Amino acid sequence: MSVELQKIAVQEIALLVPQKWDKIQLNIEIDDIEGELVISPKGKYFIGDELYELRLGVDATNAFKELRKVMAQNDRESRAWTICDLEIQNDGQYNFQFSYDEPPRLATLKE
């Protein structure tokens, strides 16, 4: 199930960039802050050597929320990841890396 959700997230992100891109890099921080799920995405994509900012749409954001929820349900300790790094190549290859550490950008909201 989470592999399918990963594919959906990748597809949603690929829809946000022009057709001729080379690589997409995305860092998402997501955490429960005072009972509210807060997301801080930072993304960029490359066309050749040119770097462009990537802004997530509602569908892509929802895909990551669902992916996080399902992965937490399948985790032995019911842990939800807080940081996701994703790299997508234009040939369709992608790599997710998840962390359960304190998300640095969102940590300032907890003070």
Image (cartoon, rainbow, N blue to C red):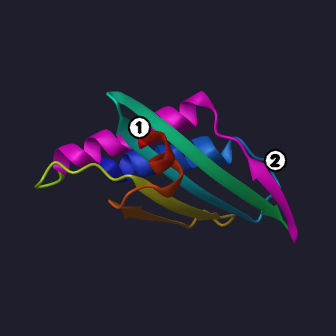
Q: What is the x, y in percent for residue 88?
A: 61, 62
Question: Quick one: SS at disc 1?
Answer: helix
Residue drawn at the location 72% of the way across and 56% of the way down: 44
Seen as rendered, the residue at the extreme front is 111
Report the disc number at residue 10: none
Three-letter amino acid code at the position of disc 2: Pro
- Crowding around mark 1 (Cα neighbors within 10 Å: few <14, some 14 to 19, many 20+) is some
Viewer-side residue, 57 vs 10: 57
> In this picture, which residue range is highlighted in magenta?
48-74
Q: What is the x, y in percent for residue 5?
A: 40, 45
Please tell me how many numbered marks the rendered image carries. Answer: 2
Q: Nearer the viewer, mark 1 or mark 2?
A: 1
Residue drawn at the location 62% of the way across and 45% of the way down: 13
Question: Quick one: SS at disc 2?
Answer: loop
Three-letter amino acid code at the position of disc 1: Lys
N-terminal label among 1 and 2: 2
Q: Are marks 1 and 2 in contact (CB under 8 Å)?
A: no
Viewer-side residue, 111 vs 17: 111
Q: What is the x, y in percent for residue 85?
A: 51, 61
Examine the residues drawn in magenta and state their main secondary structure: helix
**Looking at the picture, does residue 18 appear above or below residue 32?**
below
Per the image, is 71 magenta?
yes
Location of mark 2 (residue): 18
Location of mark 1 (residue): 65
Residue drawn at the location 68% of the way across and 41% of the way down: 15
